Amino acid sequence: MKPIVVIGSSNTDMVVKTAALPRPGETVTGGEFLLAAGGKGANQAVAAARLGGAVTFIAKVGTDSFGDQAVAGYKKEGIDTSQIGREKDYATGVALILVDQKGENLISVASGANFQWSDADLSRIRSVVEQAGIVVVQLEIPLRAVKTVTKIAADAGVPVLLDPAPAAELPEELLRNVSYLKPNEHEAETVSGIKVVDEASAIQAAERLLELGVRKAAVITLGAKGALVLERGGKPQLVPAPTIQAADSTAAGDAFTGALAWQLQQGVELFEAVRIANHAAALSATRMGAQPSLPTRKELDDFIKP
């Protein structure tokens, strides 16, 4: 089976779990500290690999110790790291994350090597993208790189799953190369221009995303409510998420994206793929950290069975 090719960011996450998120100018003490591997691209690659997907990860890291640790970690997960570039003049990306008792978070990212993509880099990975089973991309790398790889994939007939995070306005020329767009409420609003506050407005946003050019489907994640799915030519459907006690939502969206890519790569029908992805995201949110929270296939199966 052709690989899941994930193109995106690799970060080291520095997480503080605290009673409440500080307001501007406020200091909150008494938190717990966790150092973990992260980055949306890396999280999604690890999520798909742990569930059994054959994954190639394309990214940029520094030649520092964080970069060494990141690449070693991906190899341990069984991910093909041969396309990860090392930048000697830039640090590996770092994310500073604050998480409160309800699992809500604030995140600030120093992108570092993640934004060092040259034309030569994009040329080098062309054949890998063209031979993928599905390509997964996010927005923690330069938009120019996202535009290029999605066009390469679309021209080769390879489906593209775009997670438009962090939120950004996207040109229609990019959206026309995307098979599946998977935003959350805020990202859906930014791309579609429609404020998402409930299921009805999520449907309106999904309809607008398809009007803007998304090829196959819009999948808008709605947190604890689940995900609103609208396929081109189909009817909208809310796929509910399981009820959990959230500990840290940091990588829940990435768990969803990785699981969705894994299911779609196997030819699973979209609504069932979203149901599985909802469970992967929910299980991730019950644990601390980004990559440490991502479930294995057995853990996901055990979570779904009851």
Image: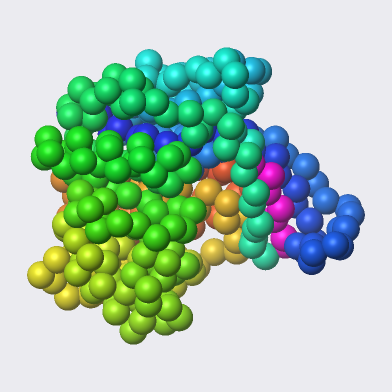
Query: Residue 154: x, y in percent?
Result: 16, 42
Looking at the image, residue 110 lies above or below residue 212: above
Toward the viewer: 105 or 273? Answer: 105
Query: Image quadrant for the N terminus?
Result: top left
Name the quadrant containing residue 185: bottom left
- The answer to whether one can see residue 302 in this image is no
What's the residue at 48%, 29% (across, down)?
Answer: 116
Toward the viewer: 25 or 285? Answer: 25
Query: Residue 142: x, y in percent?
Result: 43, 40
Q: How is the image coloured?
A: rainbow
Q: Is residue 76 left or right of residue 126?
A: right
Looking at the image, residue 209 lies above or below residue 300: below
Magenta-span inclusion, residue 69: no
Toward the viewer: 183 or 85? Answer: 85
Range covered by the magenta-colored residues: 95-101
What's the residue at 72%, 60% (across, down)?
Answer: 100
